[in-house]
Image: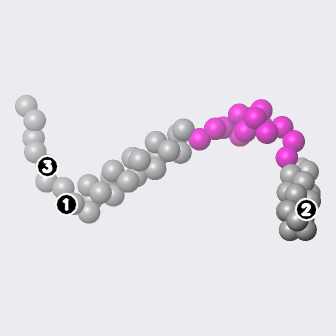
């Protein structure tokens, strides 16, 4: 047996958006996976700044 429950469009949309957002959050890499993929990013700022500076001079 199944019972029908009426849900407003706004409520259904909110539930769908919440489920979609949760699915995306669940697919994000964990902090450990990020550390494994990008072990040392401390010099990225300096490297990006230098690359942008070189590009502007050309």
Report which residue position mark 1 lands on: 8
Query: As drawn, is 47 to the left or to the right of 15?
Result: right
| Residue 33 in the image, given as x and y percentages of width and height | 71, 34
Label 2 crowd bin: few (<14), some (14–19), many (20+), radius 10 Å: few
- Residue 13's x, y, as percent? 29, 57
Residue 18, position as x, y percentages in the image: 40, 52
- Residue interval drawn in magenta: 28-41
Q: Residue at x 86, y 52 (%)?
A: 44
Q: Tell me, for residue 5, which label it has, or none.
A: 3
Percent position (x, y) of residue 45? Answer: 87, 57
Q: Nearer the viewer, mark 1 or mark 2?
A: 2
Instruction: Tell me the CA gap for discs 1 and 2.
Output: 56 Å
In front of the other: 6 or 57: 57
The reply to whether discs 1 and 3 touch (Cβ–Cβ < 8 Å) is no
Residue at x-position 87% and y-position 42%:
40
Which labelled disc corresponds to residue 39? none
Q: CA distance from mark 1 to mark 3?
A: 10 Å
Asked whether the beta carbons under mark 2 and mark 3 sit within 8 Å of each other, the answer is: no
Relative to 34, 27 lies left or right: left
Apparent side of residue 31 relative to residue 41 in the rendered image (left or right): left
Taking the magenta stretch, the answer to whether it contains residue 31 is yes
């Amino acid at each position: 047996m199944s019972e029908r429950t009426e849900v407003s469009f706004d409520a259904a949309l909110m539930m769908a958006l919440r489920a979609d957002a949760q699915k995306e959050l669940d697919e994000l890499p964990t902090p450990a996976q990020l550390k494994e993929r990008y072990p040392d990013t401390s010099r990225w700022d300096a490297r990006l700044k230098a690359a942008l500076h070189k590009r502007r001079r050309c």
